[in-house]
Amino acid sequence: MEIAVVHGPNLGRLGKRLPEVYGTKGLDDLAADLRSAFPGVKWTFFQSNHEGALIDFMESSEADALIINGGALAHQSYALADALEAWERPAIEVHISNVFKREVFRHKSLLAPKVNGQIYGLGIKGYLLAAQWLIS
Amino acid sequence: MEIAVVHGPNLGRLGKRLPEVYGTKGLDDLAADLRSAFPGVKWTFFQSNHEGALIDFMESSEADALIINGGALAHQSYALADALEAWERPAIEVHISNVFKREVFRHKSLLAPKVNGQIYGLGIKGYLLAAQWLIS
Amino acid sequence: MEIAVVHGPNLGRLGKRLPEVYGTKGLDDLAADLRSAFPGVKWTFFQSNHEGALIDFMESSEADALIINGGALAHQSYALADALEAWERPAIEVHISNVFKREVFRHKSLLAPKVNGQIYGLGIKGYLLAAQWLIS
Amino acid sequence: MEIAVVHGPNLGRLGKRLPEVYGTKGLDDLAADLRSAFPGVKWTFFQSNHEGALIDFMESSEADALIINGGALAHQSYALADALEAWERPAIEVHISNVFKREVFRHKSLLAPKVNGQIYGLGIKGYLLAAQWLIS
Amino acid sequence: MEIAVVHGPNLGRLGKRLPEVYGTKGLDDLAADLRSAFPGVKWTFFQSNHEGALIDFMESSEADALIINGGALAHQSYALADALEAWERPAIEVHISNVFKREVFRHKSLLAPKVNGQIYGLGIKGYLLAAQWLIS
Amino acid sequence: MEIAVVHGPNLGRLGKRLPEVYGTKGLDDLAADLRSAFPGVKWTFFQSNHEGALIDFMESSEADALIINGGALAHQSYALADALEAWERPAIEVHISNVFKREVFRHKSLLAPKVNGQIYGLGIKGYLLAAQWLIS
Amino acid sequence: MEIAVVHGPNLGRLGKRLPEVYGTKGLDDLAADLRSAFPGVKWTFFQSNHEGALIDFMESSEADALIINGGALAHQSYALADALEAWERPAIEVHISNVFKREVFRHKSLLAPKVNGQIYGLGIKGYLLAAQWLIS
Amino acid sequence: MEIAVVHGPNLGRLGKRLPEVYGTKGLDDLAADLRSAFPGVKWTFFQSNHEGALIDFMESSEADALIINGGALAHQSYALADALEAWERPAIEVHISNVFKREVFRHKSLLAPKVNGQIYGLGIKGYLLAAQWLIS
Amino acid sequence: MEIAVVHGPNLGRLGKRLPEVYGTKGLDDLAADLRSAFPGVKWTFFQSNHEGALIDFMESSEADALIINGGALAHQSYALADALEAWERPAIEVHISNVFKREVFRHKSLLAPKVNGQIYGLGIKGYLLAAQWLIS
Amino acid sequence: MEIAVVHGPNLGRLGKRLPEVYGTKGLDDLAADLRSAFPGVKWTFFQSNHEGALIDFMESSEADALIINGGALAHQSYALADALEAWERPAIEVHISNVFKREVFRHKSLLAPKVNGQIYGLGIKGYLLAAQWLIS
Amino acid sequence: MEIAVVHGPNLGRLGKRLPEVYGTKGLDDLAADLRSAFPGVKWTFFQSNHEGALIDFMESSEADALIINGGALAHQSYALADALEAWERPAIEVHISNVFKREVFRHKSLLAPKVNGQIYGLGIKGYLLAAQWLIS
Amino acid sequence: MEIAVVHGPNLGRLGKRLPEVYGTKGLDDLAADLRSAFPGVKWTFFQSNHEGALIDFMESSEADALIINGGALAHQSYALADALEAWERPAIEVHISNVFKREVFRHKSLLAPKVNGQIYGLGIKGYLLAAQWLIS
């Protein structure tokens, strides 16, 4: 089984940007955690600051399931939401922080109605819970 | 460790009401699943159609953590949100269905900013993931 | 055939509260009128100021049809609307006064999309017309 | 006693248009039903697709009471609402379908605050209930 | 010089409808007042409850100037506003009552930006002042 | 094959009203252009400033397809939209000017969701393209 | 009979500011016109850029009637509206330009519901018409 | 003279919940303060987390005056507002904190238009001022 | 101890303007009441219809505490709110009438978040309660 | 003559994504249809999921005319709208589906006011009609 | 060359009020800085808490250019905006703090569309940059 | 000291696009002006039509300060605003034109609360003033 983990803008600097909000672990740590917890899964990681590159990736990926954290694009990109609607395989949206405690614009995700479910605010561990659900 | 699982109005009929939305498992099944998966936890279950009874329960409970599915009260009760703010212990909000695919009034939870995080749309399994996070 | 007649908050004082709006007949008079006009029906009457008690009643009632006047809860309770959606038997919403001539918040009933139809503004007689439709 | 029954745009095709919403009975069937149920009433029927013609009719009619289904004009015509306010005799607004289950624009009737009461969603029988109230 | 005086829906009953708002003078009285005060003007009077008839009149009229009281259509008819924009001759909008003391929907006239000016709330005399401006 | 071409208020003066917006060709020129380009089609032309007359026409017409330019009624008439929904044959909405460059109220057409498609802003030629699509 | 003519901010420069909107006549010309047209009236003129001074004037004035052009304060000053409500004598609001053709904030006058009527868009002559109504 | 002091949800924990907002005194301290300051008054205290229980209390209470702090229900319960409207005796609404410095939803009280007046933000002493007004 | 009592526009006519709303006592009576009830306080009274004069006063005043009734400026003046924020000493906002029973614009006070608390709707006595709180 | 045909995000999968909405033809089929129908035109095709790439293309293209289907970017990209405004040559916006029957966010195109006209809802044939207009 | 520097309400206390927002320099320091940096300019300084006084000043000033910081009036005074529109000479609006990080009401300046440009958030130095632009 | 100057979409064509709005100078001229005026600064220039590329640049840049003109992305890109928030060094936002005189969507910059200050509407010279502030 292959699971793709997709991150949107500014998340490449995870662990360095706003550590009081996002924690100090980076994308590499996340990848290591996921590989270690689910060694039987084929993991694919993709991060880009480019909306178009995220859509390109999703169009060409043949993974069986998706974990997506769109960053700010979750709140502004109908194009990414359209791509997610065309994915047609299991998908979970993750946000590391509790977006409902932050600015109003982060309270509404355009991606949310296009996925199976959401895990928000549970930090890096949210990805592990998402993976657990996808493989169960 | 004690975890309280609190359900709001109409969830007493879980498994019978709208099974195409909520599935066919009832609260008893959920309790059995949680006890079986986490035998070391002391589980307390509480369901009520009364906003006041939910607040009464939360005021008197001495559990270490909370999993709450407020039902429709999640979207309309500032009183419940105030009670949750006064809880001051770990708490996760769960919705069984993907609320963002349903009526607009369900898109906004007044409880969401008062908890650590949210798990929405992942069915009965969402409670198990919530428990796993709380005990980790 | 059994018909349940459910009244929400403040309607226990019907006939005493705001008689220029609601008239001088109380719930007892209403019950007498219905029993007299439809002697072959088994009538069940329930009034409560508690949203939760109204939902409890609807969950346990086995009546064949429902006439509901939710009082102010008609305009604010998604939980009651959810309970009504789960009723799945004939139901009519009644308001005694013409709510569209009163405060704006009374112009929108959350219960209205969950019932077969509405009879508003026709006074106590509105219940009799509702009963007539339900038994026809 | 004379009762006028007024229908607005597109209701001339009642029974043919959207039968899954409005049923298969036409205006002629409705007239027959009313005459048969209330033979002592003098019935006047008027249907027009023209807002102006509806107002002309109401200005010249000398009926004792009115049953009005304004069709889409109920939701958009302040001119018809002004005419109804000038009617100054008993009047009931009827909609055949439950307008609160349909498009949002149908949830607000400009005519509603100008009549005694409303009967919505009870099909063709709603007119019979209205008549019963008017003659009682 | 020819001046056309155009009235919209429900104004045919001027003097009879809502006399506490509109006064007791009718359209005939108004015509007499205008003819008497400005005998040198050729007066044309037109009233209709039909939006289309008002537009027909304006398309065919060759009057030099216009006084228009659209009634409720002033607040809802873009079609009438378009016709007024195509008039391209002097025009004044009159309302007999002070619309800003009445329902909110009457506070905005769609016709107002299409005329030279407005005279509101000055009763029947408003037409005489309008005429005086048009001939000066 | 019969195609009906329906025009709403103020379009009878096409070619004379606002020529810098609508061009100098009138409805007769349009008819000639259509007859000349599609001689095999039976053409029916109808223009009215009366909403009711437009609905009457559509109720009685037996044409195979419709081209409709509702004028200002496109933006204000739910009754016309209801009639169009009942048409149940191919239909295209045309606007001569680019409505999105004009006043905000013209940006939303109530007719648009009731037709197959829209051709806006392409002048008189828009009708010819519409015809071409309908017969193809 | 005494009539007070009150002007708000920026109107002291009438005739110099935006002559394409307001014309070239100044307040002095207006005074001369009014005195000449109505020699039997005792005229009082007051202009101020200070909201407080306008209210002070109105509190102390003993004129029999008022013509007021509040300038931009008409659209922003509830304090001036309160003062006008306390005036309790005949009053007319005048705007020189057709405010409904200008910025949206000028479409709503807070003073309008506090006066007898309004004359807008008829230039300097609007004051003369207002005076004529007040003395009639 | 009897004065009823009614508290809504979460106020049972006054003195323990959010002491930086509400202070450290509890309901018992408040009762002691009131009894001590106004020994001649018969005091009745009622607190509930249940909207329905608050309405039940108000329906059955025969006190001469009311001091009410509805907690979060002040901002969300039309049913409580209706009960207060039916109270028809002197009543004052109190909030301990300055609600206008807190979340926006607390800025609007549904109870405020149903009482004589409001005392907000003056801490526990606000109740003493309210009592002083009621007995004066 | 010095307390300044500041009144905004139109309140100079207290006792004369709208006595059914504000009562018949004037500012002089209020001053007498306060001096009599709290003889140990040094009282300073200031009323102005000028927003600027109110700010000037507050900038120069060295009183220990403030009671302010801004009149209509309470609802429209951010400048006055800024001045109040800079006051940095105890302050209470008073309204004589229950503003929540009046026009919507009076429901929101820009001054409210800048003071310690509010006393609304308790008439002239509200000032005495405010004074009592400030000196306690 | 050269015509550029530009497609935005997710349209590269045309024919595969949501065939019940967009049909089964892909971009290659569209290109073939256009080349076949208009062999004298020099056709340039460009599709990208990258907003920036679309703008880059438009900045460098020297085509004589443009047909653009921006996909979801039509509804969210002011940057693309700015690029289109700078195009300054004939351009038509096409949507394959009737966007007015779909989600609300698709009802407003930011590109619409920047082109000559729009053809919506007519499927793949919409491009052929657009081409016909551009070359006529 | 003469440059007028105009300050609105509460800015007379610059350096004393909210120093963490506005810094510790006062208007005198600002004047000294400007005179020192641009000795060839004739400087005129004007500050008032009175909207009317600011307009009076601008009507009578014959300076060649203007630097204006309207304080809270920037966000509430259409009268001041009208005066600025009538200025018709170069003008720059300055705010000392970054208004977009503060309350929402400060995000919109009514003065902004009436000046050449804006310099916000750059502290006292913003005035020096404004001056440099005006004399260049 | 190094200053980065970043430009968003469509600004690569500065000097050619809309010269009546933006002037005739291009990015090269701007670079020359800045190098000439501040020869001691190390200047880095970056322009892209790609939101992602702008974020990439900002993530990797080690400049000491930033001048940013986001073009249309200033008004629509939360992702760019997030990147700017993570910049954590001095930054100024510049717009060449007075955005408050243009379309409404340009009045709100998402970048504005993330920078030290703004300079809008002062043309190419705005960059020079920004530089002067950054190096002072």
Image: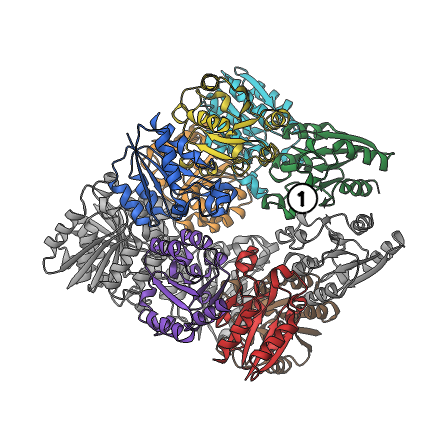
Chain colours: B brown, C red, D purple, E blue, G yellow, I green, K cyan, L orange
Q: Amino acid at mark 1?
A: Pro
Residue B17 sits in quarter: bottom right
Residue at left offset 45%, top offset 52%: D86
Q: Is residue E125 visible?
A: yes
Residue E34 rendering spot, x and y as whole percentages: 37, 33
Residue L37 rendering spot, x and y as whole percentages: 45, 27
Name above or below for residue I112 compared with residue C103: above
**Looking at this view, is D126 or E112 the one in front?**
D126
**Looking at this view, is I84 or K100 the one in front?**
I84
* Quadrant position of the C terminus of chain K in the picture: top left
Name above or below for residue C64 compared with residue G43: below
Mark 1, other Cα within 10 Å: few <14 / some 14–19 / many ≥20: many
Give the total of numbered labels. 1
| Secondary structure state at the residue bearing disc 1 | helix
Residue B46 sits in quarter: bottom right
Residue G22 rendering spot, x and y as whole percentages: 42, 25
User: In this rendering, would G114 be left or right of G36?
Assistant: right
Chain label for disc 1: I
Name above or below for residue K65 compared with residue K104: above
User: In this rendering, would I45 be left or right of L93?
Assistant: right
Residue at left offset 26%, top offset 42%: E59
**Looking at this view, is D91 or B69 the one in front?**
D91
Q: Which residue is mark 1?
A: I113
Residue D7 rendering spot, x and y as whole percentages: 37, 63
User: In this rendering, would D37 be left or right of I100?
Assistant: left
